[in-house]
């Protein structure tokens, strides 16, 4: 098996060669590769050893708690990643699927069928599980992928990359279907983004700095995503007990990810009853709350006294992705005001309403223009596995060519098949 390299033109040419081999591969081969990845993950001790070294280096370098959490692998997380590979293997094959077809009046038979996008470049930060998730989905869909993870997880990614490549070869697929850039030099990212002769699509998963870099240098199509400023609006008609549970889950279940809750909007009609309960709940959970002026006046003095987890919100605390156990709160006077706030501050990722009023729910889902809009559910469900896609390569916040979690079908395009009986155009 060829070793991984940082010669980008060579990576690109090997990826183009790999997609030609993938084009004639069978579903059985591709699924076997995914099952082999899962088996090798669970059997490998090298992954955890490499990851422990990355975490120790990250702690020494002063990475935030959120980044360290994203970086860390545990036996439980590895088991979940392996299970995800098996889930993807069990999904129906999207390749060759007939999208639609018809026979024209002149007798031509016209159809559209799903095909791979081609060579995909994925640029991401901190999370080594993404290496496996992207590899599994691109293999399933017959795409080749060039991976560029963050320097903070390089040791782990090198082990994972070799593991995936070995699994491909064991299944009779080209190892170069998955390649990893092992040099953390940022200049290589700029070079990669200029390789439109071999790369068909770029998917950046990371913060605003990464996305700005891609916007500046990419010469090929890009699917943007990953930045989530997520809102939940507690309507006047909400079930307050149930709303507390949803908000707690959305904020605390995995606070360092893009679909975690950042801002709670509370209707003024229920704010006096609801906000003290919200403060009590999160005080017990160790979550810091940044309250606007109206919210702060509703917190009883006894509850506010010596509460280091309470602070006044500034203008910058709205429209901010916290990625930690912090969120902001604002009181609004109407559904329209809540929708206007979301329109101003949301990144069009995941936003929701908590209400028992069906008309308000319908208005919210019609007017809020986010990739995933919720009614009475946690924003944490914005995930390929949770929404039945098996896994995802990213969560797109744009309109073209896909929105929300990018699963199997979103990693395909289509081609027209036109069949005739030696037709000529008049």
Image (tube, rainbow, N blue to C red):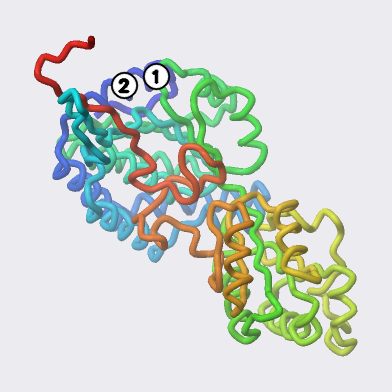
The image shows residue 295 at horizontal and vertical percentages of 84, 75
Residue 331 visible in this rendered orientation of the protein: no
The image shows residue 284 at horizontal and vertical percentages of 69, 83
Residue at 72% over, 80% down: 278
The image shows residue 320 at horizontal and vertical percentages of 73, 54
Residue at 49% over, 46% down: 403
Check disc 2: other Cα within 10 Å, few if <14, some if 14-19, many if 20+.
many
Residue at 72% over, 68% down: 335
Furthest residue in direction bottom, as rendered: 302
User: Mark 1 and mark 2 in contact (Cβ < 8 Å)?
Assistant: yes
Q: Which residue is mark 1?
A: 198
Q: Is residue 407 left or right of residue 416?
A: right
The quadrant in which residue 197 appears is top left
Q: Relative to the observer, which residue lies in front, 19 or 331?
A: 331
Q: Which residue is mark 2?
A: 16
Label 2 secondary element: helix
The image shows residue 73 at horizontal and vertical percentages of 45, 57
């Amino acid at each position: 098996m060829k070793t991984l390299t940082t010669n980008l033109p060579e990576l690109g040419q090997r990826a183009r060669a790999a997609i030609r081999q993938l084009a004639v591969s069978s579903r059985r081969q591709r699924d076997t590769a995914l099952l082999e990845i899962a088996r090798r993950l669970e059997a490998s001790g090298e992954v955890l050893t490499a990851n422990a070294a990355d975490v120790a280096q990250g702690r020494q370098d002063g990475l935030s708690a959120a980044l360290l959490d994203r970086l860390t692998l545990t036996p439980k997380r590895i088991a979940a990643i392996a299970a995800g590979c098996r889930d993807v293997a069990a999904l129906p094959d999207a390749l060759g699927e007939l999208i639609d077809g018809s026979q024209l009046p002149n007798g031509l038979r016209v159809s559209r069928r799903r095909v791979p996008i081609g060579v995909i470049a994925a640029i991401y930060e901190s999370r080594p599980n993404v290496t496996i998730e992207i590899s599994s989905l691109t293999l399933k869909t017959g795409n080749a992928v060039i991976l560029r993870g963050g320097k903070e997880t390089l040791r782990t990614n090198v082990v994972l990359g070799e593991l995936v490549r070995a699994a491909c070869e064991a299944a009779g697929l080209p190892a170069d279907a998955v390649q990893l850039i092992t040099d953390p030099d940022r200049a290589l990212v700029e070079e990669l983004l200029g390789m439109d002769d071999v790369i068909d699509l770029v998917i950046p998963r990371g913060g605003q700095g990464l996305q700005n870099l891609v916007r500046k240098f990419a010469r090929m199509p890009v699917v943007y995503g990953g930045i989530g400023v997520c809102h939940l609006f507690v309507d006047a008609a909400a079930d307050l007990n149930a709303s507390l549970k949803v908000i707690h889950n959305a904020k605390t279940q995995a606070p360092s990810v893009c679909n975690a809750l950042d801002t709670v909007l509370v209707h003024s009609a229920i704010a006096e009853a609801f906000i003290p309960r919200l403060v009590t709940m999160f005080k017990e959970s160790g979550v810091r709350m940044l309250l606007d002026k109206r919210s702060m006046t509703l917190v009883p003095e006894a509850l506010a006294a010596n509460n280091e987890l309470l602070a006044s919100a500034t203008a910058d605390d709205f429209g901010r992705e916290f990625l930690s156990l912090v969120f902001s709160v604002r009181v609004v006077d109407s559904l329209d005001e809540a929708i206007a706030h979301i329109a101003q501050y949301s990144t069009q990722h995941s936003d929701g309403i908590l209400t028992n009023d069906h008309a308000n729910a319908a208005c919210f889902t019609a007017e809020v223009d986010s990739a995933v809009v919720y009614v009475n559910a946690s924003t944490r469900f914005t995930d390929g596995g949770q929404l039945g896609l098996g896994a995802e390569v990213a969560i797109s916040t744009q309109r073209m060519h896909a929105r929300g979690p990018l699963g199997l079908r979103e990693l395909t395009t289509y081609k027209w098949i036109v069949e005739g009986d030696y037709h000529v155009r008049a």
